[in-house]
Image (cartoon, helix red, strand yellow):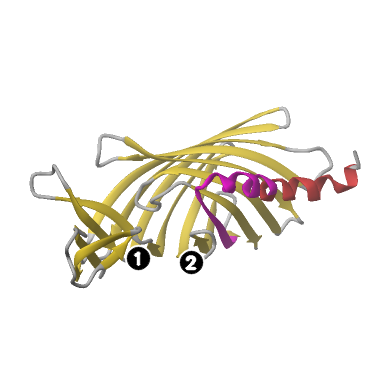
Amino acid sequence: MNLRNLPLRLLLLPLSLSAATAAAGDDFGIWTGISAEKKINRKFSAEAGIDFRAEQQLKSAARWNASIGIGYKPLKWLRMGAGYSYIYDRSPQESKVNYNKTGTRRNGYNVDHGFWRSKHRLYFNITGKIDAGRFTFSLRERYMYTHHMKADCIRDRYRDPLQGGYNGPTYTWNGEQFMNFEQVDNPRKAKNVHYLRSRLQMSYNIRHCPLEPFVSYEFSNDLSNALHLDKTRLMAGSDWKINKKHTLSVAYVYQNGADDDASNDIHVIDIGYKFKF
């Protein structure tokens, strides 16, 4: 094995994993982020970042995000942080079967158009880590409060499947014809959500190598619903420390489930760049 090519191979591994697994029928996307961190003193630091996501097989922009925060490191193994994020994301088109009033017979579909919505998020996290040889193990607990602004949405209503002898206009959805159709406003109300996100991570410091591979597993629990598990996220990738100020990160992400940030299973290539002042 040519060790000179090891950094490149480790960086390309997440891309290979994502391409191989996205064929399973789930969604596929690319998440990108740029962030900067400024060390204030030995214990405090400030940071800011911008993120962009493209999903739905890369056919649609899915999210813009801007954040600011502050970090506090009272001990070598302990770090705390808090911050604010402005999120502007898109909920994709959603189709649901409609039943009659008794719920015994399918009568058509309700199709909600995709829409954009602003969100304001406050977060607080605490991270502990331990070193074991060249391995580092960490646990991060993050509380998130998110306020969803109200948003406009349009709903298409397809009703009454086509019957024999009908000669009027027809409307097609999901390969089926219906005799009635109407388009109505379906505004989304403002709401507040509370989540606890827990992340376990393991990284490995390769001797005399600028790359540090890692794997992490994160799960999101809804604090408003008895800590119900809504979403899990598996990530495998590598950080490339170009020098003391510049770090590039590339990872494969598999996200399963739905919470206030996601509505489907998705395979992702995650690319991030961080600059330290």
Say if residue 65 shows up in the picture. Answer: no
Give residue 60's mark: 2
Where does the C terminus fall, quadrant-wise?
bottom right
Say if residue 262 shows up in the picture. Answer: yes
Of 49 and 89, the residue lying toward us = 89
Residue positioned 31% across, 62% down in the render: 173
Three-letter amino acid code at disc 1? Gly
**Is 272 located above or below residue 219 in the figure?**
below
Three-letter amino acid code at disc 2? Ser
Query: Could you say where residue 207 lies in the image, as x and y percent from the top left?
Result: 82, 38
Disc 2 is placed on an element classified as strand
Give residue 6's mark: none
Q: Residues within 10 Å of mark 2 (few under 14, many from 20)?
A: few
State the separation of the CA atoms marked 2 and 1: 11 Å
Residue positioned 50% across, 39% down in the render: 127
Q: Is 24 on the left-hand or right-hand side of 87?
A: right
Residue highlighted by disc 1: 114
